Image (cartoon, grey):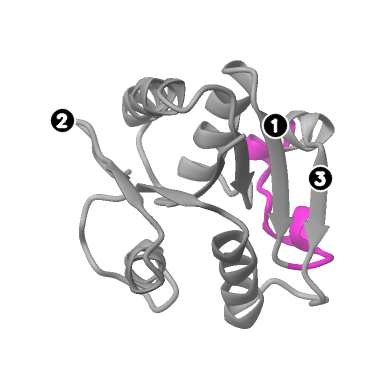
């Protein structure tokens, strides 16, 4: 089973979620059932996790901190987050009490070091340190194949 990680924008529109889901579903189908590795953030991470599970794959979750669910998962994302967590075969929690830049960097490193490919739901814009652009750059430096997913019509909220 191919191990595929995800990095991507949290702030995608609802219409973009549908476009991204379809594109990821098609991309994953090429590999057969996969093991998907996700931090389950809103947006790209959760869309990817749904596509992995819907395609018959396994989901592994990497949480940046012990308080991630309580501190960072907003009420409008909590139900989906909890459903995805229940279906995860592995949950790894980084050794941080609080979700902060260091915790996110550690979670990205854990995800990237345990995958054979990376799906990046990314519009190509560089942003904050530790964002999707940085994860893509790091993956490429390590010769991890990167599949950019940003279908025509996609937009950030």
Q: Mark 2 or mark 3, which has the lower sequence index?
A: 3
Residue at position x 36%, y 72% from top? 134
Crowdedness near tag 1: few (<14), some (14–19) or many (≥20) residues, C-alpha within 10 Å? many
Residue 41 appears in the rendering: yes
Residue 3 at what x, y percent from top left?
58, 44
Magenta stretch: give its range. 65-80
Residue 69 magenta: yes
State the CA–CA distance, disc 2 to disc 1: 28 Å
* Residue placed most toward the observer, 126 or 112: 112
Residue 9 at what x, y percent from top left?
40, 51
| Quadrant in the picture for residue 49 | top right
State the CA–CA distance, disc 2 to disc 3: 33 Å
Residue identified by numbered label 1: 58
Does residue 154 appear to the left or right of 103 in the view shown?
A: left
Residue identified by numbered label 2: 152
| Quadrant in the picture for residue 17 | top left
* Residue placed most toward the observer, 5 or 50: 5
Q: Secondary structure at mark 2?
A: loop
Query: Which residue is outermost to the left?
Result: 152
Residue identified by numbered label 3: 90
Residue at position x 66%, y 75% from top? 103
Q: Secondary structure at mark 1?
A: strand
- Report the magenta stretch's main SS: helix
| Quarter the N terminus occupies | top right
Instruction: Give the foreground label among 2 and 3.
Output: 3
Residue 150 at what x, y percent from top left?
25, 39
| Quarter the C terminus occupies | top left
* Residue placed most toward the observer, 24 or 17: 24
Crowdedness near tag 3: few (<14), some (14–19) or many (≥20) residues, C-alpha within 10 Å? some
State the CA–CA distance, disc 1 to disc 3: 9 Å
Q: Mark 1 or mark 3, which has the lower sequence index?
A: 1
Q: Mark 2 or mark 1, which has the lower sequence index?
A: 1
């Amino acid at each position: 089973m191919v191990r595929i990680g995800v990095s991507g924008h949290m702030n995608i529109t609802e219409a973009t979620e549908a476009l991204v889901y379809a594109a990821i579903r098609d991309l994953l189908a090429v590999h057969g059932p996969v093991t998907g590795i996700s931090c389950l953030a809103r947006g790209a991470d959760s869309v990817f996790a749904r596509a992995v599970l819907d395609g018959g794959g396994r989901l592994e979750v990497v949480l940046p901190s012990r308080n991630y669910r309580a501190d960072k998962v907003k009420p409008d994302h909590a139900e989906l987050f909890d459903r995805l967590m229940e279906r995860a075969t592995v949950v790894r929690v980084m050794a941080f009490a609080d979700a902060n830049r260091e915790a996110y960097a550690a979670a990205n490193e854990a995800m990237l070091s345990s995958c054979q490919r990376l799906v990046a739901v990314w519009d190509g814009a560089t942003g904050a340190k530790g964002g999707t652009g940085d994860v893509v750059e790091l993956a490429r430096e390590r010769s991890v194949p990167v599949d950019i997913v940003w279908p025509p019509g996609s937009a950030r909220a």
